Image (cartoon, rainbow, N blue to C red):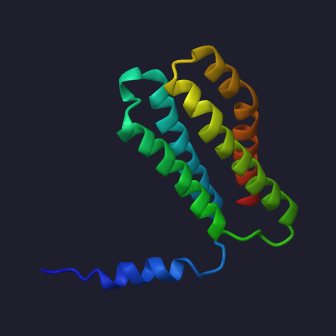
Amino acid sequence: MRRSLALPAFALLIGAVLPLSAGDFAVLKSETETARKELVTMVLYPGKRGPEQQKLVKDTANAVSAHLAKLKAPAGRGPQFKELKETWEAFKHTRETELVPAILAGEKEKAEKIAAGIQKVRLERCYALMLELDK
């Protein structure tokens, strides 16, 4: 029995234009957790710092950005949504320009300072905003 891919493809297409539904920010949070997991893998396992893992780290963060770009602020929550977008972009920028390069250069203390400092604060704020926006 052959299954048609037309219906799932159509569902994906219309999903991009349907109004926001409950759970959109929970999905975004899950994607953010995946991006974090890939970075933690890079930190914990020096053998996982090659091109393949670097691509996973970049691709998972880009997936969060792409998903966030498709979302709109829930009614009455424009300021929180704007803060989420700004906080994520700052988080991602620091991750790509400071944290990952420090990890790859073996600068453990520098990487730990960035990760346990501003990046931890930003990530926690993103999670809190996602939770708030998903209500």
Q: Residue 8: percent from the left, percent from the top?
A: 37, 78
Q: Residue at x 41, y 29 (%)?
A: 49
85 to 38, vertically: above or below: below
Q: Is residue 49 left or right of residue 100?
A: left
Q: Residue at x 53, y 77 (%)?
A: 15
What quarter of the picture does the C terminus occupy?
bottom right
- The answer to which of 90 and 122 lies nearer the viewer is 90
What quarter of the picture does the N terminus occupy?
bottom left
- The answer to which of 74 and 88 lies nearer the viewer is 88
Q: Residue 59: percent from the left, percent from the top?
A: 47, 51
- The answer to which of 61 and 50 lies nearer the viewer is 50
Determine if residue 23 is in view: no
Q: Residue at x 53, y 56 (%)?
A: 63
Would you identify the image quadrant in which residue 82 lies?
bottom right
10 to 31, vertically: above or below: below
104 to 82, vertically: above or below: above
Q: Residue 54: percent from the left, percent from the top?
A: 44, 39
Name the residue at the left extreme.
1
Name the residue at the top extreme.
109
Q: Residue 134: percent from the left, percent from the top?
A: 70, 60
**For the image shown, how many numbered marks are present on the structure?**
0
Would you identify the image quadrant in which residue 103 lies?
top right
Q: Residue at x 84, y 66 (%)?
A: 78
Determine if residue 4 is in view: yes
Q: Is residue 77 left or right of residue 103?
A: right
